[in-house]
């Protein structure tokens, strides 16, 4: 194996495909959103990218071993072509993030991508009811378009910048003259958050032009709600806190 | 020295050799099993692999320094040719795991290997009497064969996947069309576990077709048992716990 | 992207430009000083250096993403040409520091640099009124010149040496026969320190030959003073301590 | 700068020079011993090795910056040619240790080295009066020679092997057919230990054939003794312990 090993699974014919990245991160918001698209629309795995920058690990499902990788799926969403990027891992080191993102962009642009959305969560530190979507983008025009769909572009948020593959898809995407935006659903940071995932999917619906069913995400959100309530009851009705809610999901 | 330095110690003539990996890991189960094969059958060191991905270290035995390495031994087990991989170290970093495993597979396939077993332990967190062997493999057929020998293939076990050289032997082995399986003996995770090593050797006996004597492993297991009993007596008969049993052996 | 990606923003005609480095460090002294020069004099960004050795991160300002980089600005200070290096990040690893500094020196010498000042802070561990500037340099003559401006060259200070890009600009600069000095303003180490930044700028004024207005730095210093006083009042008039002052700014 | 940068300071004519390594380590035993040879005999710096594997750092002495490096000195000890390796740093990472040691061996063998001693300390965990010298070597014959000088070669000591440049000088030295030994002075592990340094120098005296004056090491040992006694008095005459003695020197 070389530093990267790109496996071709299918060669679909795509029209102006939009890349949508949903690797693991805060509240698994991006990952939930990306996987929801794969469940709700017809999809086909197109490329797998293996790399020594991923953890040295196989996942096991029903006794079958699967090497750590990132996967690109062709998704047709109401006539719009999407390339949805999923996976279970971020790279392990600084240079690994740069190199993997660079290679991902090579593969995506070879498939015709000129526009991309990196999906993620931004932690608020508390459980609230209404979560906004915070945005960051590479170009003025793209910012304006997204503001029309309700995305908030704030003076100094997210405060610590955007770290990892999501951040570099914007940073390296801009250097390739791609239109790139990061959509970050606000989320407590304590829970896997299907509600936050829904808010960023609603932005994609409007921006790209498709409609997706949210029933399964709602069900998952209801399950999470029950978990939270049970914990609050155990705690004698106290507000759920950092300690007892850390990454339930 | 280059990134890898492969030393040739012998050029045995092997017939369909099966690679068996037993590097250090949980409960030293894989290492105990692999070393037991070297003790019980006639064996000959065939290759040594030195690498900058191992710790910068020499071991010292009777005043003689020996550079960190992995060692391949040719073992004849009742007419079956085995290549047993042993060593005292795992690589230090992500890319090191990928590159070492890749090089090991180069060396093994050059020696005719088309089938491999990675041996290890999977921690249960408690001391129990009967330990199952959990499996993961690259192909349907291999899974079926191993199920016949009593290996359990479970829906979502091991939960965290398989990390390190064992995991990558499956992941990278599959990409080379090798038949690869990982046999993981259940073990408390607190003790060097000769009993667990025996359970995976029994799977190998049936799967590969040889019979090995277990007297020395049994003796070692009895010694461990005594250690555990002494600790339990010191603790006033309490169940041995995480803290006082961490890696005795 | 390669290991480094140097973007050319302008090709100014410079006469004997002096490189001035102000990356983040103790008390943000070097960064404050460098940025003050950009504010007070006419300046133009000349080069941006992107690198996989920086954190995998974009900063976000008003919704626009900006990839981690170091930036060289051409500054004309009373007829003297300066090349001021700013940025938000130090490299992540040992080799990254060496390679980035080496590349920075390539870029700077291509632009005509033969003399450089690395700016930083040296922590004293207590809040005091008068801070000296400690120096280190590559050549006897340069040391003599700077001593005339009040820089102190002490037998064994800074005790731990100079770490990071500042240190390597001296170390690697010397190996290229550049005149290189590091000016380290004493600073408590607990606060962003505009006063300390002023002391090193005063050395630069005399050594290079320009005069800069300090009003905005003084204002910032006054604001910091107020913060410190408020904390001391909250603490019942006690001397501000390590714990409650750690990096306010 | 490349990965390594070897600076030639002198081209002495050496007869069968013996390499003696004294980089920092336990009790600074090896470093003290190597530096004592430089002080007591006529010596000349011959090579400096700079590397991105060292910390990104300059040391500062009297205001002059000196880039992290390892230094080879030609020493004439009663007619015997020594090449003494000193420095303030060990490499930062696994591969860095391998590559630096490999390069050091290139440089040393180019200068005619066929035999080397790596010097270090082995921690005993307690303050005692008589410290043995523990040895490890690459060849039977070398072991026998050193045993005659009182070096102890023990079945399983040092238990954790020999880590760092000292260990790899043996491991990689053996692969180049060099005679290599590591001499490890027993030392508490809490103190810079001039006494332990003397014990290994006494082995070198007999093995190589020279006589060195120990007055300055004895003085330093007496100073350390006083420090220990003061601490014991402060502690009410109690035995000095791990906590209050950790690396005084």
Image: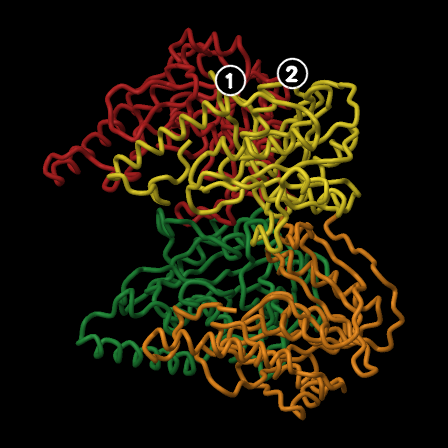
Chain colours: A yellow, B red, C orange, D green
Residue B6, visible in the rendered structure: no
Residue drawn at point x = 34 percent, y = 79 percent: C238
Q: In the rendered image of this protein, does residue A116 appear above or below residue C63?
A: above
Residue drawn at point x = 77 percent, y = 47 percent: A175
Quarter holding residue D72: bottom right
Foreground of the two, C158 or C39: C39
Q: Secondary structure at mark 1?
A: strand
Contact between labelled residues 2 and 1, with CB atoms less than 8 Å apart: no
Quarter holding residue C215: bottom right
- The residue that label 2 is drawn on is A42
- The residue that label 1 is drawn on is A64
Side of A145 relative to C238 (left or right): right
Q: Secondary structure at mark 2?
A: strand
Image coordinates of residue B63 in percent, x first then y, are 41, 50
Quarter holding residue A213: top right
Disc 2 packing (10 Å; few <14; some 14–19; many ≥20): few
Disc 1 packing (10 Å; few <14; some 14–19; many ≥20): many
Q: In the rendered image of this protein, does residue B82 appear above or below residue D241?
A: above
Residue B89, visible in the rendered structure: yes
Residue drawn at point x = 22 percent, y = 27 percent: B222
Foreground of the two, A215 or C241: A215
Image coordinates of residue A141 in percent, x first then y, are 76, 44
If you read the primary sequence from the N terminus, does the residue marked by circle 1 or circle 2 appear first?
Answer: 2
Foreground of the two, D146 or D201: D201
Q: In the rendered image of this protein, does residue D66 appear above or below residue B28?
A: below
């Amino acid at each position: 194996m070389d530093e990267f090993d790109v496996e071709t699974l299918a060669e679909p014919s795509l029209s102006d495909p939009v890349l949508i990245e949903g690797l693991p991160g805060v509240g698994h918001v991006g990952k939930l959103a990306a996987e929801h698209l794969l469940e709700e629309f017809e999809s086909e795995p197109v490329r797998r990218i293996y790399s020594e920058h991923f953890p040295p690990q196989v996942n096991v499902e029903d006794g079958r071993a699967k090497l750590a990788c990132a996967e690109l799926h062709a998704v047709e969403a109401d006539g719009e072509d999407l390339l949805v990027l999923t996976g279970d891992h971020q790279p392990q080191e600084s240079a690994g993030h740069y190199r993997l993102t660079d290679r991902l962009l090579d593969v995506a642009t070879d498939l015709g991508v000129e526009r991309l959305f990196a999906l993620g969560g931004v932690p608020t530190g508390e459980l609230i009811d209404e979560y906004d979507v915070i945005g960051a983008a590479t170009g003025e025009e793209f910012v304006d378009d997204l503001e029309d769909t309700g995305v908030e572009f704030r003076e100094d948020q997210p405060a610590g910048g955007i770290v990892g593959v999501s951040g570099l898809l914007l940073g390296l995407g801009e250097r390739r003259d791609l239109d790139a935006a990061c959509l970050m659903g606000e989320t407590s940071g304590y829970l896997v958050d299907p509600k936050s995932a829904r808010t960023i999917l609603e932005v994609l619906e409007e921006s790209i032009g498709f409609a997706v069913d949210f029933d399964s995400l709602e069900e998952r959100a209801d399950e999470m709600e029950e978990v939270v309530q049970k914990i609050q009851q155990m705690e004698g009705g106290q507000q759920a806190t950092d300690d007892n809610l850390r990454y339930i999901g």
